[in-house]
Image (spheres, helix red, strand yellow):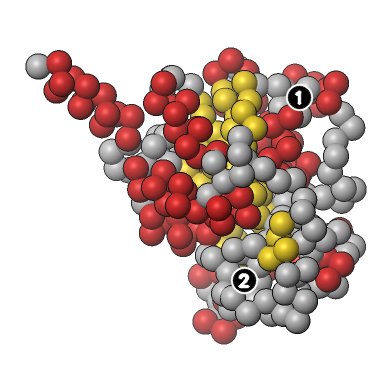
Amino acid sequence: MLEQIKKYLRIDKFPHIWCYGCGDGIILQAFVRAIASLGLSQDEVVVVSGIGCSSRAVGYLDFDTLHTAHGRALPFATGIKMAKPELTVTIVAGDGDIFAIGGNHFIHAARRNIDITVVLFNNATYGMTGGQYSPTTRQDDIATTAPYGHIERPFDICGLAKAAGATFVARSSSYHAMALPKLISQGISHHGFSLVEVITGCHVCYGKLNDLSDPVKVLEWQRDHVVNIKQYEALSSKDKEDKMPMGILHQVTRPEYIDEYRKVLERAKT
């Protein structure tokens, strides 16, 4: 399997810039394993990112990749999919990128149900720029821009995706490294807009302010708070308050945007 992973990586770009213990590397290998399991060639896959620690992943992936402006990964990915619908178009990006400055783009891409897969690295902070709070920072936690506690409620990313119209919504964590590739491959295989949220951590910026500076503690937190959906559904309402369900949370079939656009083109010819 190591050779399969290396095949999809730009080895000359290593060593990477991520901090030791960062979950981004775990998600990167899970993404590569998912592509390998689907038997996709490098020429069939495009990977798009925005800006941030997670978005640096495209620099290490040996596909056609695009490192775009902050929050703009989805418009670029949409353009690629419209121009070359036969390609498998994916996005790797962070919570601050996709759901802050890029939030409006996400809502409408999900609404259109365009066949793009977003693999979201959710570390609940802006790790690259110093630990500011993001749309997913947990209430009462500390950030460099919330030194006395964060008062805003965090986005339920998966709930937002479902409400906006995404037809495949799933969640996992960097702790669940062995199960993650299958979930990503299921998202990529789904015909429609897919979100795979991966709960990860930033033990350097976020962790040092919230008693999670040890990367092992970060993984233990994920183990205890991200639980199988069947276990989650069996919990009481009170016990659910600090837990997140893991697995495929929503999957439906409805018309995909490119398919519908082709019908418009045919009508325009008549």
Please state the horizontal and vertical placement of residue 203, each as a whole percent of the image.
Answer: 83, 60
Above or below, 150 against 72 in this view is below
Above or below, 193 against 5 in this view is below
Please state the horizontal and vertical placement of residue 55, each as a whole percent of the image.
Answer: 68, 40
Return the residue at label 2: 243
- In the current view of this chain or complex, which residue is farthest to the bottom? 238
Q: Residues within 10 Å of mark 2 (few under 14, many from 20)?
A: some
Numbered disc 1: secondary structure: loop
Choose the circle earlier in sequence order: 2 or 1. Answer: 1
- Residue 184 visible in rendering: no
Q: Marks 2 and 1, Cα distance to the nearest angstrom? A: 34 Å
Please state the horizontal and vertical placement of residue 227, each as a whole percent of the image.
Answer: 63, 64
Please state the horizontal and vertical placement of residue 256, each as a whole percent of the image.
Answer: 32, 36
Quadrant containing the N terminus is top right
Q: Is residue 85 left or right of residue 17?
A: left
Q: Which residue is more in the foreground, 226 or 159? A: 159
Numbered disc 2: secondary structure: loop
Return the residue at label 1: 9
Q: Quadrant of residue 119?
A: top right
Residue at 9% from the left image edge and 16% from the top image edge: 270
Residue at 56% from the left image edge and 56% from the top image edge: 100
Q: Is residue 12 left or right of residue 62?
A: right
Look at label 2 and name its amino acid. Answer: Lys
Q: Is residue 143 left or right of residue 195?
A: right
